[in-house]
């Protein structure tokens, strides 16, 4: 079973705004398609499930985006595994998360760069508490890279392994997935795996040769139980299956490849 543990499926207007941001500040997105076409692309390419990770950049948006994600999962129950999001510090987040994680949502997405918040910020305590209570993962972009001026902040002020460590020390029952293999602090995040059994990394855009600061693929070989295959589809500057081909080219032992490509995601999001 192959599960893409990191996809972004947004309403059309929001997706268009995100593409404009990428055009201005990051890269040209190759897959400018709607969500149903995106799901079809993955299905036709042999993907058995995808984890939908919504995020928002300001208050007042999360309910609508979460409702959209839940409806999408209802349309594609065999493919879309929905996660929810909240904007940190917004009133009602505790109730919002309790309702979401008691229902159809399988985890939470937080983007420290977009939301301009560090993983150990007290406004995220409600998220970590919800993760620990429901035993559902928080996919949190808290590696420093890619550090793009378009975020409007120095990303190192709101990211890093040390700040995630402080958050997990306060909430030892929480489950965290750090995308992009934590670049460019991959060594620090990997070292944390020994002491934090609820910590995982995903491969998103970190093993395709696109960025100059990618970690060695040996990080995947060393930690097959703690790595998830993810891509950032459709917001990619290259073909959607480039990451998949890269991981398969590593020729991991079959049992390890099965864990990375889907088994770990099934355990975390379908547990």
Image (cartoon, rainbow, N blue to C red):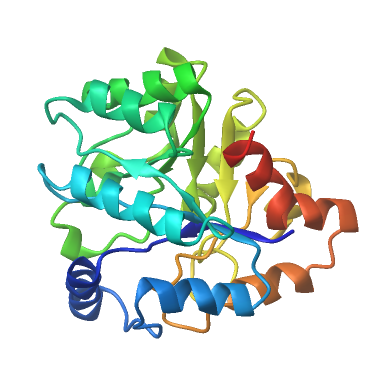
Along the line of sight, the residue nearer the viewer: 144 or 83:
83
Q: Is residue 132 above or below residue 176?
A: above
Q: Quadrant of residue 36?
A: bottom left
Instruction: Name the side, left or right, on which 70 lies relative to 87.
Output: right
Along the line of sight, the residue nearer the viewer: 141 or 255:
255
| Residue 123 in view (yes/no) | yes
Q: Quadrant of the C terminus?
A: top right
Q: Residue at x 28, y 74 (%)?
A: 26
Along the line of sight, the residue nearer the viewer: 265 or 146:
265
Along the line of sight, the residue nearer the viewer: 111 or 8:
8
Q: Quadrant of the N terminus?
A: bottom right
Q: Where is residue 105 drawn, in percent x and y? A: 43, 39
- How many numbered dots are placed on residues in this image? 0
Q: Residue at x 54, y 48 (%)?
A: 186
Q: Residue at x 78, y 68 (%)?
A: 250
| Residue 211 in view (yes/no) | no
Instruction: Name the side, left or right, on which 259 lies relative to 90.
Output: right
Q: Is residue 226 above or below residue 17?
A: above
Q: Where is residue 241 drawn, in percent x and y? A: 60, 77
Judged from this view, the residue extending furthest toward the front is 75
Q: Where is residue 35 drawn, in percent x and y? A: 38, 71
Q: Where is residue 204 drawn, in percent x and y? A: 52, 61
Instruction: Name the side, left or right, on which 101 lies relative to 217.
Output: left
């Amino acid at each position: 079973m192959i599960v893409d543990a990191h996809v972004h499926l947004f309403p059309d207007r929001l997706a268009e705004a995100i593409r404009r941001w990428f055009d201005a500040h990051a890269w040209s997105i190759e897959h400018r398609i709607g969500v149903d076409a995106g799901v079809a692309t993955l299905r036709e390419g042999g993907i058995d499930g995808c984890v939908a990770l919504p995020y928002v950049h300001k208050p007042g948006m999360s309910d609508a985006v979460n409702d959209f994600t839940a409806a999408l999962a209802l349309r594609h129950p065999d493919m879309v595994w929905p996660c929810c999001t909240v904007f940190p510090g917004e009133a009602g987040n505790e109730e919002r998360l309790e309702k979401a994680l008691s229902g159809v949502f399988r985890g939470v997405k937080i983007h420290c760069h977009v939301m301009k918040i560090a993983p150990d910020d007290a406004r995220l305590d409600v998220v970590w508490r919800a993760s620990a209570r429901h035993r559902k993962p928080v996919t949190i972009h808290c590696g420093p890279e890619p550090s793009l001026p378009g975020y409007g902040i120095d990303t190192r002020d709101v990211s890093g392994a040390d700040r995630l460590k402080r958050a997990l020390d306060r909430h030892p029952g929480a489950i965290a997935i750090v995308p992009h293999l934590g670049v460019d602090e991959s060594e620090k995040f990997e070292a944390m795996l020994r002491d934090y059994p609820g910590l995982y990394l995903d491969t998103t855009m970190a093993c395709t040769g696109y960025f100059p600061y990618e970690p060695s693929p040996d990080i995947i070989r060393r930690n097959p139980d703690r790595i998830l295959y993810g891509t950032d589809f459709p917001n990619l500057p290259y073909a959607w299956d480039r990451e998949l081909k890269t991981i398969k080219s590593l020729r991991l032992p079959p049992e390890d490849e099965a864990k990375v490509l889907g088994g770990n995601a099934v355990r975390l999001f379908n547990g």
